[in-house]
Image: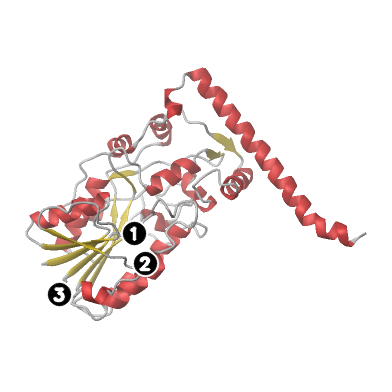
Amino acid sequence: MKILVTGSTGAVGRRVCAVLADAGHEVVGVDRRSSVRPAPGVELVTADLAVTDLRQLFMGVDTVVHLASGLRPQEVGADPGHAIPAVAQRLLAALEDSSVTHLVVLSTAMVYGARPDNPVPLTEEAEVQPCPDFRFAVRRADLERRAEEWGRGRPERVATMLRPAVTVAEEKPGGLARLLTSAKAIRSEEGDPMGQFLHADDLAEAVVVVVDRRPIGPVNVAPDGWIPAPLMAELGGPVPRLRLPAPLGAGVARLRWALGLTEAPPGIQPYTVHSWVVSNDRLRELGWEARHSNEEAYVAGHEPGAFDQLNARSRQALSLGVALVLVVGLVSGLTWLVRRLGGPSANGSD
């Protein structure tokens, strides 16, 4: 079988290509970068999905595994995942006239949204309702919808949507993990959610399983269970956090984003407050089993920072300093906003 993998030089893509090639498949890896040496038996094509003639790439291909259009460093701090809709539209348009019968797209468990009434855990039957202000999750949900529509177009087509938990690799937390860590510097008094972390190797194995088994529809990807909030705080280490009432916390998050003090957009805040852990029952029924627990995956992707090396007194002083700076910044920002809004009316009354 001929399989095309986009995002083939990423942590997950490299592993997927290697395993598929070892299984005897003809594998074509596509990525914007060409500096990574492909695994034996993998043909690497350097191409930008936003401009390349995709119809030529899909000639003779049976399965497309779409791992590209994730959170890239250059997108963090601007509009995470902004390229997803355009790439998806071009990809699916090219698939219409191709020989491809199976499409696997990488989504996220974030498409379920983070709300206080979420069931624990979420199954694939749960409603897709991403938090509307976090565009990355909204656009992943739209990608799923487009893929599902493509799958319904002809009886021989199968569309599989993978919904992984927060994915990490060895000493590399990944885009979503970085955003969530940055966002958690501001804690809401509403509570702390449970954590769920997936090792990149386990996600790669999940991709291989669904390529082989061809399940229709969404498939959650996560280790068994989850990490309770107290253990999450312990694993996270002594990082400076400021706990605020929900409205004030939301204001501080917006101000930090506007001033460039964080790479986490304020729309991600609900995911740091409410649970969105998922069940892996469907994937396990397909024959998949995680090799790394949530705790092992978290530790593998955790990069100790300079803060972790400080003694208790220094950490406490720094935490208090961060809290003071944030509060002063919020007050200053609100004062500036009030003066700006009140300026024109004041001038008009003279």
Q: Position of residue 227 (x, y in %)?
A: 36, 38
| Disc assigned to residue 60 | 3
From this view, report whether residue 321 is shown above or below residue 58: above
* Label 3 SS: loop
* Label 1 SS: loop
| Distance from the alpha carbon under mark 1 to that under mark 3 | 25 Å
| Disc assigned to residue 311 | none
The answer to which quarter of the image holds residue 216 is: bottom left
Q: Furthest residue to the left?
A: 24
Q: Amino acid at mark 1?
A: Ser
Left or right, residue 81 beside residue 27: right
Q: Earlier in the sequence, mark 1 or mark 2?
A: 1
Q: Amino acid at mark 2?
A: Leu
Residue at x 53% of width, y 34% of height: 241
* Residue receiving disc 1: 107
| Disc assigned to residue 143 | 2
| Distance from the alpha carbon under mark 1 to that under mark 2 | 8 Å
Q: Confirm whether residue 284 shows in the render.
A: no
Q: Furthest residue to the front?
A: 35
Quadrant location of the N terminus in the rendered image: bottom left
Q: Amino acid at mark 3?
A: Gly
